Image (cartoon, rainbow, N blue to C red):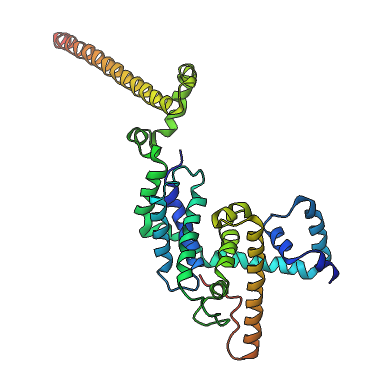
Amino acid sequence: MFSSKLVSAAELSAFLDGETDPSRRALLREHLRTSPADAQRLTRWRQREEALRTTFAPAIREGAGPMAPLARSLDQKVFPRDRRPEARVLGESSRPSEEPIRGAVGGGIGGLALIGKRQRRHTLIVAVAAFLAGAVAMLAAIALIDGASRITALYTPAPTSQDSR
Amino acid sequence: MKRNIVERLTGRLRRFARALHADQPEGAADDLVRETIEAALTARDTVERSDIRICLFHHMVDKARAAQKDKPAPAAIAAADPDMPDMIAALANLRFEERTAYLLVALEEFGYADAATVMRIPYDVLATRVAQARMRIDDFFEEASRRSSATRGTPPGHLRIVK
């Protein structure tokens, strides 16, 4: 009875939510050891809050539901950068490949550090695009040369095989 | 970069709205969610706010607060009403400000400082309301068990969890 005067229900409530002043925390723990009634009360509150979350869990499972389009339009307003066309190009699927590229051209990107974040992102996108275009062009060239030499290789042995017969 | 933050938050908004509207008919909760997102869409400050979660819950509390002022206070709901899951009945029995504070902390797991920002009330007032709500819920369940033990034959329902 006496200790319950020292620790109010309000203080117990704050303790449950981890909002107790650090200087009172040890005292509260000690109080809970010696006052089974308050310890019980704390347990009861905790259980009730678990029940509360269970009761309303279906809403979380249902997610945005019919409100999804409306929610997306707010997403677009609050985080417009995610919706820019170039951001879509560098979307989820291409994200893993971003790391090795960043490592490979790390020196170049380091030099971009002084440019604004937004601009840097633009520059990075342009650099990646240029790199990819170059790579594709080179591959195409190799394929062409390779193909051409293969054709000549095919054409030259053909008569020799006929000759040997 | 995080994506679809609001869309993912909407499930939480729906949960909070349902709990907040414990004393109102079904469908009212989703209307509140819709109004909340619409309010955030037209509000000028939404984009500048670093914490979209606080911002959205603030809009919701604002809307709900305005709506419940127009309505007469609901009569105290009889404990262990067979048509109403008990946790919901217990919530419906709370005053709006207590219920809001309690749900922000106990259901949505906001810290007191953030919950106070959501409700636009001082930290100490929030702490008091949460404590008051807990004590009032205690009283509600005590009353419920007293009644169910008084009227034998009806099963005591105060520990029922309704999914």
Answer yes or no: is residue A130 visible.
yes
Answer yes or no: is residue A59 visible.
no
Location of residue A76 in the rendering, given as x and y in whole percent from the top left corner:
37, 44
Specify the quadrant that holds the N terminus of chain A. Answer: bottom right
Which residue lies most toward the front here? B70
The foreground one among A97 and B159 is: B159
The answer to whether residue B1 is above or below residue B148 is: above
The foreground one among B39 and B24 is: B39
Location of residue B157 in the rendering, given as x and y in whole percent from the top left corner:
58, 80
The answer to whether residue B99 is above or below residue A24 is: below
The answer to whether residue B80 is above or below residue B45 is: below
Task: Quadrant for residue A49, please give it.
Answer: bottom right
The foreground one among B154 and A2 is: A2
- Rendered residue at 40%/69% (across/down): B27
* A18 with respect to B78 (left or right): right
- Rendered residue at 49%/57% (across/down): B12
Q: What is the number of callouts on the image?
A: 0
Which residue lies most toward the right here? A2
The foreground one among A139 and B30 is: B30
Specify the quadrant that holds the C terminus of chain A. Answer: top left
Location of residue A21 in the rendering, given as x and y in whole percent from the top left corner:
74, 52
* A139 with respect to B8 (left or right): left
Location of residue B89 in the rendering, given as x and y in whole percent from the top left corner:
54, 75
